[in-house]
Amino acid sequence: MSTEAIDQKVIKKPAEPLLSKRRKKLISDPLVDDNPITIQILGICSALAVTTQLQPTLVMALSVIFVVAMSNLAISILRNSIPSRIRIIAQLAIVATLVTVVSELLKAFQYDMYKQLSVFIGLIVTNCIVMGRLEAFAMGNKPYDSVLDGFGQALGYAWIILAVAFFREILGSGSFFGFPVYDTLAGWMGMNSLATNGLMVTPVGAFMILGIIVWVQRHLTKYVEN
Amino acid sequence: MQQSNKYIIIFSVILTVACGLLLSGSSQLLGPIQQKAIELDTKKQILGAVMSADEIGAMSPEEITAYYENHIASTVVNIDGEEVTEVEGTAVTAETVDIGSNYKRAPEERLYPVFIYHEEGNPENVSAYILPLYGAGLWNAIWGYMALQSDLNTIEGVTFSHAGETPGLGARIVEEGVQQRYKGKEIWGDGGQLESVIMMKGEGRDYSNDPHKVDGLSGATITAVGVNNMLKNYLGYYEAFLNKLREGSDAKMAVNN
């Protein structure tokens, strides 16, 4: 052992590139293999509630990405100074502050969306993904990696809720981002209107679409729960 | 990880102060912008009683503000229909009256704003009178604006908003299709008494022959009852004002004849 200690020279490792393979995986894993909604089954509540139309869902997705990435950054920077006994409270304080700032920004610049999303922006605080990533990653990793992880996880969440919203809006209201698709199609086919599926507008429909997406995705990735 | 109590307390205090500063700072900064957004939204709701949602959606914020300046005059009345211009020394305009906080006072003590939709540049040529309404839905407050044509009887249009009704059920009062049901209905009955308009239970029936009934919302009866009460109450509060207006225009017509 002593010979090894003498022979070893301290070699400075080159700095990891900003988007190294490991870091790219932080962003790409949560999109499919480690998706917070379909694999980890987190953040389902808002996936059911806001996804009736695509536009509020997009605003929600962007808000969650901002909150998760920024809170990951803040907690990661503070990770060595937060006393472990008030760890959860401190995390909660930071997340709640960020969510309130997002809510105030929406109220100032996108008042219509703010009215439509009303209480759900505040409920981002309760979204399991936010606190989950803080505990699982940000408390033990460096700031830049934490931001990437937060961004990746929130992106995984975002594309799933956008997919659910896409199906719910087109089947439940016959529109896409407000554009009346069903009416246009009906016009082409010479019909009065196409029937929309009322179930899709309720959370029950959201549950069903979500279940189908989880099923399809796990089938394609051959994921098996332990 | 530092574990001493003193460290924990100091950390908590610093964290709280930092978060507090961030929140109050953003609140101060964004306050004026939010105020403008809320005013613009109120104007859109008032205009929504006389214009369709599509028309308003096509206008930019500057256009909406300009249109509002040119077409909407306002006044404030009390429960007896008399105009009120100041309360205890402070001037009162329709835009400064907070309908929500007014609701907490007894009806006799409230201030009732009236918005007058007139032809551009000609305040004498009135197209509609827009009355703000406020009430209680199932979960939280509901409010809206009702526009009456110059005969003070036929409804030109309504807009409704809510604070927390159930999406897909009570929240449907904001839908254009639901609000359109009130267009053309009448508020005064045959005997000259105030009848208001009632939203019936159940959906899908045709009430085009009844000037005082509109189709309901399936699954949202309690919200509908809230809407009915809101209309009945507020039309009652404005009744004195409306009667004064009718006497005034009758007198004008008598003079012209």
Image: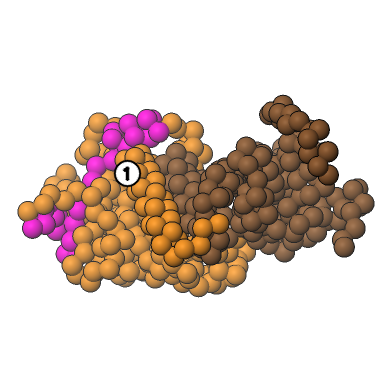
Chain colours: A brown, B orange
The reply to whether residue B56 is in sight is yes
In the image, taking residue B99 as reference, residue A86 lies left or right, namely right
Q: Is residue A148 magenta?
A: no
Identified at 14% across, 58% down, the residue is B82
Q: Chain of mark 1?
A: B
Q: Nearer the viewer, residue A132 or B131?
A: A132
Q: Quadrant of residue A209?
A: bottom right
Q: Nearer the viewer, residue B241 or A14?
A: A14
Image coordinates for residue A37, horizontal then vertical, percent: 74, 54
Residue at image coords 45%, 42%: A105
Visible residue check, residue A62: no
The three-letter code of the residue at mark 1 reads: Gln
Residue located farthest toward the left when viewing the structure as drawn: B89
Q: State the residue at coordinates (51%, 51%).
A: A81
Rendered image quadrant of residue B10: bottom left
Q: Is residue A7 left or right of residue B254?
A: right
x and y, in percent, of residue A87 in the image: 54, 60
Task: Tell me if residue B131 comes above or below residue B103 in the rendering.
Answer: above
Up-down: is B130 above or below B134? above
Q: Which residue is mark 1?
A: B28
- Across and down, in percent, residue B1 comes to 55, 57
User: Toward the viewer: A117 or B65?
Assistant: A117
Label 1: which secondary element: helix
Magenta-tinted stretch: B61-88
Q: Residues within 10 Å of mark 1 (few under 14, many from 20)?
A: few
Residue B186 vertical placement versus A22 (above, below): below
Task: Say which residue appears at 46% left-offset and 52% top-offset.
Answer: A97
Q: How many marks?
A: 1
Q: Position of residue A31 (x, y in %)?
A: 77, 43
Q: Nearer the viewer, residue B90 or B233?
A: B90
